[in-house]
Amino acid sequence: MSYKIIIKPSGHALKVESGETILEAALREGFSLPYGCRNGSCGICKGKILQGAVDYGQHSEETLTEEEKRDGNALFCCASPLTDLVIECHEIGATKDIEIKTLPCRVHNLELVAPDVMIISLKLPANQRLRFLAGQYIDILLKDEKRRSFLWRMHLMMMNFLQLHARNYPGGEFAEHVFTYMKVKDILRFTGPLGSFFLRDAPENTSIIFLASGTGFAPIKSILEHIFHQENARNNKIKMTLYWGARKRADLYLADLADKWQQQHKNFTFVPVLSEPLPTDNWEGRTGLVHEAIMQDFSSLEKHQVYACGAPAMVKAAYYDFTKSRDLPTDAFFSDVFVPSISNL
Ligand code: FES
């Protein structure tokens, strides 16, 4: 059984097939709704159900509370229609013409840049190119004998080679594969590009704050390299500050690169922040929670855009504090979160 959905305010109409979520149907029909994790954790896909009823699907209770449901909200990555619907959501024009592909690739290089962070370079087949917006991600697809897919979100860096930053963490099935078994020349398959975390146009006199925790640095690196590479007017005019937080010094695995950017670009500042520096780190820099460092440094974020990527708790706290206490407009906060790989997706 299929249902019809009207998206407001655009008035676009789409058909949702049986078993599909609203987001899946929208992406299949070429409409770009905002999304991140696609498993009910990040809240980026949250929108209003103006008319009709949905099955809310499996999601984090924190991300969509009962009160929010009563107010008409749903997570479009999890919700499936039970009737025809009218929904409210702001579509993103920029990704509309970018094709999502499933492609093979070869592991070209593996570099352990911190005790628990691996940078994986993947090479596409010679006749394939991948168009994407800096900051988007791909899902790696692996199948075991039970034909269960493991999807892991990683962030894209370059066009001909894809560069991914992978963190090892307990219980991470694909992380274990990367750190234990993966070797150069392995063949993988992936789907992408995915996600709506990428650079947006900014009004004049706007400054940009990039906020990363851990490997949340990866998509921000992608966006910054894109800006530096373009050497466009925006790069010269817009002031950019990167706050990168981690527990200890080794977790800031590309701090030297961020320092180099600071030396090369007058409009760019790098602020590393450690929450639990080791005595052997000899750390003399900022300490504490990374988003709180921004709260200390700015009395107002009214004329800023913020791009935040990292742990869900950090991203949520930043959104709440910046919009409630520092006047950041809600539509000037762009985020992505890292959620551990989930099987059976
Ligand atoms: S909660 Fe739907 S995309 Fe993250």
Image (tube, helix red, strand yellow):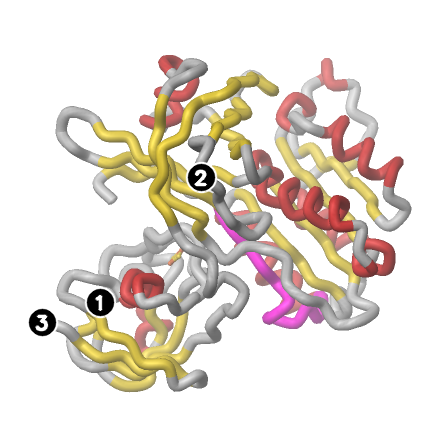
The three-letter code of the residue at mark 1 reads Ser
Q: Amino acid at mark 2?
A: Gln
Q: CA distance from mark 2 to mark 3?
A: 37 Å
Mark 2 Cβ and ligand 1 under 8 Å apart: no
Give the residue pinned by disc 1.
Answer: 80
Place of residue 119 in the rendered image (x, y in percent of width and height, measured from the top left): 55, 25
The earlier-in-sequence mark between 1 and 2 is: 1
Identity, as a three-letter code, of the amino acid under mark 3 = Met
Q: Residue at x 17, y 79 (%)?
A: 83
Q: In 3D space, how far apart are the residues under numbered discs 1 and 3 (Cα atoms)?
A: 12 Å
Quadrant position of the C terminus in the picture: top left
- Disc number for residue 128: 2
Labels 1, 3: front one: 3
Q: Residue at x 14, y 73 (%)?
A: 2
* Residue 6 placement (x, y as % from top left): 32, 82
Q: Which residue is mark 3?
A: 1
Secondary structure under the numbered disc 1 in the rendered image:
strand
| SS for dot 3 | loop
Query: Closer to the camera: disc 2 or disc 3?
Result: 2
Let me know if residue 91 appears in the view: yes
Residue segment shown in magenta = 326-337
Residue 26's spot in the image, x, y percent? 33, 67
Quadrant observed for ligand 1 in the rendered image: bottom left
Classify residue 280 as left or right of residue 343: right
Q: Is residue 145 magenta?
A: no
Is residue 71 visible to us here?
Answer: no
Instruction: Name the residue: 56% across, 40% down.
Output: 159
